[in-house]
């Protein structure tokens, strides 16, 4: 199982690294660090999420997420709004600029992988498709164990 785990991690990391570099090179504006992108994804998936909840989702310390929030607010990619139930707490919302940037990033990323998949044989494509449910279960299991 250890060898399988190493091969799987190598393949997934390799795909992510190549896609990230190629998409980043073609993206307008300064590149965002991975942690900022991850926070933007969490906020886009959970509009109005608080800093503490985002930190739990990302498995980061609250102060680390606060730093990322400040950077993204300064960059015009996040809004920090007061929580109506607790004025001391902040709720995070992605700006229109962030939504546009993330949509462009998703299109570029998906297009890049779709183009590469189109060059594979039907058998390789089918094997990847058949492996997806098991990979999704593995992802869920790893999240539960965190």
Image (cartoon, helix red, strand yellow):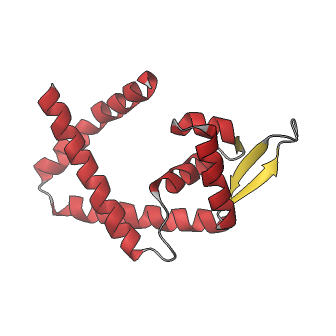
Would residue 140 appear left or right of 85 to someone viewing this image? left
The quarter holding residue 131 reads top left
Q: What x and y, as percent, mark residue 125? A: 19, 50
Quarter holding the C terminus is: top left
Q: What x and y, as percent, mark residue 20? A: 36, 61
Q: Is residue 56 above or below residue 1?
A: below
Could you tell me which residue is drawn at 47 percent across and 69 percent down? 31
Q: Nearer the viewer, residue 59 or 18?
A: 59
Q: Is residue 29 above or below residue 17?
A: below
Q: Nearer the viewer, residue 115 or 75?
A: 75
Could you tell me which residue is drawn at 61 percent across and 64 percent down? 98
Q: What x and y, as percent, mark residue 109? A: 38, 62
Would residue 2 appear left or right of 108 to someone viewing this image? left
Could you tell me which residue is drawn at 11 percent across and 48 percent down? 123
Q: Is residue 62 above or below residue 78?
A: above
Could you tell me which residue is drawn at 28 percent across and 31 percent down? 134
Quarter holding the N terminus is: top left
Would residue 24 appear left or right of 6 to someone viewing this image? right
The quarter holding residue 83 reads top right
């Amino acid at each position: 199982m250890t060898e399988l785990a190493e091969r799987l991690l190598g393949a997934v990391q390799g795909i992510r690294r190549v896609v990230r570099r190629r998409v980043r090179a073609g993206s307008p504006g300064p590149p965002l660090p991975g942690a900022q992108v991850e926070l933007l994804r969490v906020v886009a998936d959970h509009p109005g999420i608080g800093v503490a909840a985002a930190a739990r989702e990302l498995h980061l310390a609250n102060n680390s997420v606060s730093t990322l929030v400040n950077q993204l607010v300064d960059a015009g990619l996040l809004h920090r709004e007061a929580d109506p139930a607790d004025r001391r707490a902040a709720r995070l919302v992605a700006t229109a600029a962030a939504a546009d940037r993330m949509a462009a990033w998703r299109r570029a990323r998906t297009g890049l992988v779709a183009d590469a998949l189109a060059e594979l044989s039907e058998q390789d494509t089918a094997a990847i498709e058949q492996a997806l449910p098991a990979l999704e279960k593995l992802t869920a299991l790893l999240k539960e164990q965190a």
